[in-house]
Image (cartoon, helix red, strand yellow):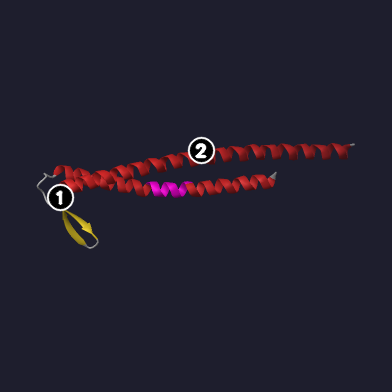
Amino acid sequence: MAAEIDEEVAKFRLVQEDLQKVRNDLQIVMGQLAENEMVQQELNLLDSNTSVYKMVGPVLIKNSHEDAKDTVSKRLEFITSEKERLETKAKNLEQKGTDISQKVQQMQAMLQQATAAAVQQVAQHHAS
């Protein structure tokens, strides 16, 4: 029984590691989302005749206002879907961790009961 508990604890640790990675990825995506929302707001303030440049490697290239808005809009769609995917994955991992934790607690309680019963049997055997 103790080996099974150790195995479940190892699974729990792996889930926690995965959850931490997902949370780190989510934090990066949230930063990208905020940055792109800010760019979109700035583009919305400009009139359509304003020159817009995008960086391609080390070079700034002129880009149409409409293309820039479309690019940022598509990027926001992608980032938002990635954010939702990561949030769902985090929620699922949290639930899996909770399930494993409850299973370990039940297994530990059963082990304690079995140990107590064995000690009581030994005590009764020595008393006879």
At a point 52% along the width and 46% down the height, the residue shown is 15
Left or right of residue 17, residue 2 in this image:
right
Q: What is the x, y in percent for residue 13?
A: 55, 48
Secondary structure at badge 1 equals loop
Disc 1 marks which residue?
64
Foreground mark, 1 or 2, reads 1
Task: Please name the residue shown 17% across and 58% down the image.
Answer: 61
Res 80 quadrant in image: top left
* Residue at x 31%, y 48% (from the top left corner): 32
Percent coordinates x, y for residue 88 in the rendering: 43, 39
**Residue lying at the far right of the rendered structure:** 128
Q: Is residue 21 left or right of residue 100?
A: left
Q: Which residue appears at 83% of the width and 40% of the height?
A: 122
Asked whether 49 or 7 is in front, the reply is: 49
Quick one: quadrant of the C terminus? top right
Whether pointer 1 and pointer 2 mark residues with C-beta atoms closer than 8 Å, the reply is no
User: What secondary structure prevails in the magenta region?
Assistant: helix
- Residue 52 belongs to the span the image colors magenta: no
Q: CA distance from mark 1 to mark 2?
A: 47 Å
The three-letter code of the residue at mark 2 reads Gln
**Which percent across, then down, holds residue 89?**
45, 42
In this picture, is 57 found above or below 33? below
Q: What label does residue 81 carry, if any?
A: none
Which residue position is annotated with label 2?
A: 95
Which image quarter is the N terminus in?
top right
| Span highlighted in magenta in the image | 19-26
